[in-house]
Image (cartoon, rainbow, N blue to C red):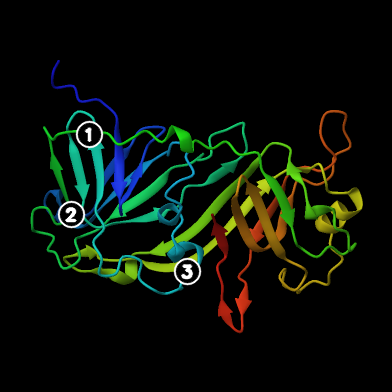
Amino acid sequence: MSSILIGPGYLTWNSGTFRAASDIVAEFKKDLRDIESLEFGKIDSVQTARMIVVKCRLFSTWTNLSLLFPSAALSPAIGTALYGASNLALIVNGADGSKLTVVNAQVTKLANLFLGVSKDIFPADVEFTGLLLNGGSPGTSGDYYTYQVGQSYSAPAFPNTSFTAPVISAAWAGTLVNSGTSFAAFYFKEGATIDWEYELDFKPCTVDGFGATDAIIKNFRATCKGIPTFGPLEADTASALFPAQALGLSENQNGAGDLTLTWSGHSVVLHKAFVKASDGFKWSTTNNRLGNLTWQTTVPFSTGVAQARVTVS
């Protein structure tokens, strides 16, 4: 019975501590090439690449913001390398004395957000991906990860005072055809869901015999979905849903504006956002006339220089 391994843990990365709301999962991924023989078919496999993906659902604390939402994602320099020359170790600290150290890790999937009181603030996992140690060798023990047992365990203070279930107010600065202003202050009927589209490409940095050694930043944008209430007037809503624009105009040309969500001195701002989709209007005794709206970011520029697409504070 003593061979059954079970128990909780927490993460440390880049001087930050991350407490989990659900299982911490480490996946040891490898690419294989089949070895085939004319006489016997597929007789074996050879490993050609590997990486370690660590993911977990975070406890609902509004902390480690610069780590969870790094500027490399929110204000990306498209075409640049994510990992670079640094080796940031991700450590899974098990309460049973186990310790997994992924020696070269970066955030490769941002944690989506739910801003409201009815659900946890992090509805989806954050993901870290570990690659070969910068300057390391695939054949050297410990150049991807180390695993230890029987280590001393000292849990940091539990961040209960940073628990967050925000009541948010919202404002959208988009220009409406109706010239209305009722989106300047509103709330969401069922909270707001923010999803991140963070695109990375490992292939350009893949080297034969070494696998992926870095990742190139390809794109980032964000969406926010929710049902506006306590503010938007029907005429302004119609203008947002059915803009009288000629086909072929970009949404930025058609009045995209910052969508700002605030609570208790904190904020999430989707810059130059436009209404991408909606549930339309409903004539109902049980549903609001206005259903979900989905905003999507565009890229703001200042004298030809791309600015941050999202800010989190």
Q: Position of residue 167 (x, y in %)?
A: 65, 39
Q: Is residue 89 left or right of residue 20?
A: left
Instruction: Look at mark 3 in the image and give the residue it sits on.
Output: 76
The tag earlier along the polypeptide, 3 or 2, is 3
Give the label on residue 144, or none: 2
Q: Amino acid at mark 1?
A: Ser
Q: Quick one: which residue is furthest to the bottom in this view?
A: 303
Question: CA–CA distance between discs 1 and 3?
Answer: 37 Å
Q: Nearer the viewer, mark 2 or mark 1?
A: 1
Residue type at mark 3 is: Pro
Q: Which residue is mark 1?
A: 154
Cβ atoms under marks 1 and 3 closer than 8 Å: no
Q: Is residue 191 above or below residue 208?
A: above
Q: Label 1: state its secondary structure.
A: loop
Q: Residue shown at 68%/57% (left/top)? A: 259
- Which SS class for mark 2? loop
Q: Quadrant of the C terminus?
A: bottom right
Q: Give left or right: position of 99 versus 162.
A: left
Whether residue 253 is situated above or below residue 11 in the rendered picture? below
Relative to 209, 7 lies left or right: right
Can residue 161 be seen here? yes
Camera-side mark, 3 or 2? 3
The answer to which of marks 1 and 3 sits earlier in the sequence is 3
